Image (cartoon, rainbow, N blue to C red):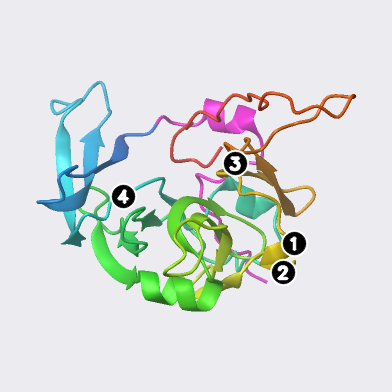
Amino acid sequence: MAQPTIDPTFYRTAAEAAAAPVEQLAYVVAFDRAAQKNDAMTVVDVNPASDSYGRVVGWTDVPGLGNELHHFGWNACSSALKHEGHNMDGLARRYLLVPGLRSSNIYVLDTAPDPREPTLVKTIDGETLSAKAGYSRPHTLHCGPDGVFLTCLGGAEGDDDGPGGIALLDHETFDVLRAWETRPRAAAPPLRRLVAPQPERADLQRVGQPFDDRRRDRAGAAAEPEVRPRHPFLGPRGW
């Protein structure tokens, strides 16, 4: 029986990732703060041996103005090796899912066959995100056990101030499935901006304190917010 083809950029340990060939390209979003020009996904050559090292070698506009493209991610990454539910046959780190923080749209870019020329293949509009998951203001993406997790800062359309939460997207079609949380929104804790995948437990841990979240000392008095370091972006491998 033939074994499924596994993307060679999926690694079982951080040591394997560190020993792997370095990235040749980096994807960097560009946006116009004045919202007069289209936002874009740029491609930067990061190969020191290349004549175009450090230069923009690709550029893909997304439609509309004022999207404010934000923390994007891959459709799949090394965590797929630990998660049940993936169709591993042919699964590859290929599609970039790019949320617009202001527009609440999500853009799916295909980096194949030429990674220097990503093409827009799907747009998930903010109305769909709101109707199916009850959230808006998409912020950060993580590939995970049930699908692609999308943390959102806002509630449904018209309730952009929240509370937000996590929307679940299908691994293959990238359709919005539902809100990931099973608790009623009224019972949910205050929003944390970031989530940390824990593959061994097949769940997510919310990290980082919201602005109005106060710890209490042993006497019950309000304490200052806990300050925790933010996770650095460690590149497109998903670590």
Q: Name the residue under label 3.
A: 11
Q: What element carries label 1?
A: helix
Q: Residue 17: x, y in percent?
A: 55, 32
Q: In the rendered structure, find residue 184 and report the number of the disc placed on it.
A: 2
User: Residue drawn at (52%, 62%), measured in percent from left and top?
Assistant: 91
Q: Place residue 145 in its image quadrant.
A: bottom right
Local crowd size for mark 4, using a 10 Å CA cut-off: few (<14), some (14–19), many (≥20): many
Q: What's the distance in space between the residues labelled 2 and 4, CA to CA? A: 29 Å
Tell whether label 1 touches label 4 (CB within 8 Å).
no
Q: What's the distance in space between the residues labelled 1 and 3, CA to CA? A: 37 Å
Residue 3 counted in the magenta span: yes
User: Residue drawn at (54%, 26%), measured in percent from left and top?
Assistant: 19
* Looking at the image, residue 185 lies above or below residue 59: below
Circle 3 or circle 4, nearest the eye: 4
Tell whether label 4 touches label 2 (CB within 8 Å).
no
The kind of residue on which mark 4 rests is Leu
User: Residue drawn at (74%, 61%), measured in percent from left and top?
Assistant: 187
Local crowd size for mark 2, using a 10 Å CA cut-off: few (<14), some (14–19), many (≥20): few
Q: Name the residue under label 1.
A: 187
Q: Is mark 4 on a helix, strand or loop?
A: loop
Q: In the rendered structure, find residue 229 and report the number of the disc placed on it.
A: none
Principal secondary structure, stretch drawn in magenta = loop
Quarter that holds the N terminus:
bottom right
Local crowd size for mark 3, using a 10 Å CA cut-off: few (<14), some (14–19), many (≥20): many
Q: Residue 216: x, y in percent?
A: 80, 30
**Which of the two residues, 58 or 136, is positioned nearer the viewer here?**
136
Tell whether label 4 touches label 3 (CB within 8 Å).
no
The stretch of residues the image draws in magenta is 1-22
Q: Which of marks 1 and 3 is nearer the N terminus?
A: 3
Q: Mark 4 points at which residue?
A: 69
